[in-house]
Amino acid sequence: MKTINSWKVEMLLISRSLWTWLVFVAAAIVVVIQYQTHLEMNDPGRAVTSTAFIVLGGLFASMILGLTLVRNEHVSSSYELFHVIDRGYFAKIWGKWLALLTCVVTFSAIAALILFCMYFIYNVPSVFYSQAVFYLLLYWVIPFLVAGMVGMVSGLLMRSRLVFAVLTVIWLLTGPLNYDIFSQFFFLVPSVDPTPLMDFLNLGQTNPYEPFDPIYGFPMEIPRWIQKGIIGLGAAGFFILTAIIKCKVKFTMRWAIVFAVMVLSLTWLSAEYAKESQVIYTGNRKYGVLGYDWHYYKKHPVPSIQDQVPFDVSSYDVKLNVYRKLSVNLDMVVVPREKGRKLVFTLYRDLKVKKVTSNGNSLSYRQSGDQIEVQLSTPINLGESLPIHFEYEGISSPFYFANEQAVMLPGYYAWLPVPGAHPVMRYEESLLFPNDLSPKAPVHYRLTYEGPEPLYSNLKKTGENRFEDTVAGGITLVGGKYVTSRTVNGTTFVYPKSFYKLESELEEMERNYRGAVQLVSNDLWISKKQDSKILFLLSLQDESETTHLLWHSDRYAILKIQQFFNDDSRLLKDRAFFIRLTASSFVKSSPSGQEIQNLFSDAYLYWVEQREPGWVQDGRSGMSQALERKRKTLEMMQGTLDQKQLNQLKEEISIYEDVIKYVNEKNTREIREFFRDFHFALNQPKTLTWDEVRKLMKEGE
């Protein structure tokens, strides 16, 4: 009863404080502005994640609130009075903690209510309502409560003004900007990587600047909940212990049991936190999306193990389990193209093989980088079929996630062992590009799946979480609560639920896509019909700007998208956009540089624009824009580039000018032949040079 009365008094004092209302109203206004700004851009996810800076302010406000609560009695000189009453000050402390909890929950609840009202006004899908509640609990309620307890403990232990300096340091260490603020100090010790510690201490998001990923959703992986549990439980234990000591409460068996349970809970949580689990960290940090694979493939551009016996895989029977990480039991049938004993497979390097068998007999194997070398017990002859069983598990690439929250495994990514030795990705001109490792010939697949649902695949669904089909292009899997699908004119679109504005444009998008595929196929003389029945709109994070924006395979295609497409869907309705993408997508992992591939798609679109006036909505050609950018770059960087770079840039400008002149002067037959030859040359294993492009133009004359 003393605690409840104390809570009522504290809430009364808080409600009478002018500062309370000023902070509350100011925070509410900022929250509304953040929500409104991003919902007007039809980005319901960013409307929530952009509040990371509000969390930074909320952490400091909670610390000051906790400090103020425990110091009220000292300010009013009533501190000794409560100590006279039996367990009076201890009850007072718990009343203050309840007041802190009430303030945190009330503010978060009001923010959630405002968000729900705005979601309703903007017709946001229902999944965002429930997920926003969990997000606010993870990144608002728990952090604010922990920060408030830190303020209370600091106030109980320290009476001087030094407490404000201590709280400021703790605030910066536990806020969403801790990495940006403190990582610079670790430059003095380059051998120490501060990111694991900074990420663990961070009570907010890892990167408040990062756009919302419409497939992955809010970053709420299990380790993040465990991290908050460890910090929250630790803060609660320290708070209780400090209150017991300062209030001179007798340490009874009841308190011993409480602390024993807390220690056991912390031990269990720490063990769970240490388990292997995929957490998507954004930014350029060593294990972030844009840093982890980038650093590896820059240092390892070639396979770790060289090819041995050439072979094909005729079938895969996959049992896939996704929970915190990817686990696979796989039966495949291998058909060699010549006699031999060693088979080399490519599998993403962090998926670690546990067992390889054939007909129940263990096979020796060696895994290094992206390669697995399997030693057969006896040589296998040309054309023979050999069953091989793999068991492996691990963390997928940050580009292609697979955990308890969501799955996005495109067919060109080696999450299944594929024949031969290849790097899964390639480093080129400071950027990282995925290599297309999907089988080009039809392969029979059977998949049994357990993981985030619903799951969408290019395979036919044969039962509950069962899929089977014979296709080329591998298996593409997309799953999670943020994904949905819709069929338009025989084409199934798999896309994020956050694309609710785009849904009304799918018919026009389908027409433009179909028209572009037909046009490009006819012009480039592509004999195999690229008639995709499934179009995956995926938030791929790889750095390619053209080659994998649109990726074609047998009966399905992948289009790289970002959340802003929901706000400005003109790109997805622009015929020129699809023509450029389709032209670039028919170039499969060319060894030629990205600039030459860009020239091909830019030049092809330029030719189409000359034949079909009005294709470009703003009246400006992509080819002309690219040439203009290169000329401006040459003008601005004349004094900073070395001679080799200058010559290369001048060569690019010259070839663009030559191609424009060629397209403007030659007839349709000659131009079509040039682009067919250009396309054929790009798909060869040999690297294409600028001089060879000029030679192709001369041959077409």
Image: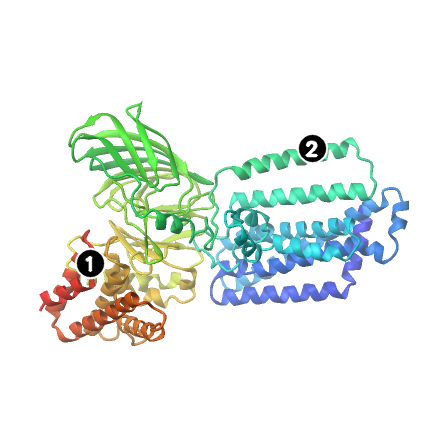
Q: Quadrant of the C terminus?
A: bottom left
Q: Residues within 10 Å of mark 1 (few under 14, many from 20)?
A: some
The N terminus lies in which quarter of the figure? Answer: top right
What residue type is disc 1 on? Leu
Q: Is residue 164 left or right of residue 667?
A: right
Disc nearer the start of the sequence (1/2): 2
Task: Return the residue at label 1.
Answer: 688
Q: Residue at x 24, y 49 (%)?
A: 554
Alpha-carbon distance for marks 1 and 2?
69 Å
Which residue is outermost to the top? 361
In which quadrant of the rendered view does residue 678 lie? Answer: bottom left
Q: On the rendered structure, is 34 left or right of 401?
A: right
Whole-percent x, y for residue 342 in the image = 24, 31
In the displayed structure image, the side of residue 427 where residue 8 appears, left or right:
right
| Mark 1 secondary-structure assignment | loop
Is any atom of residue 113 visible in this view? Answer: no
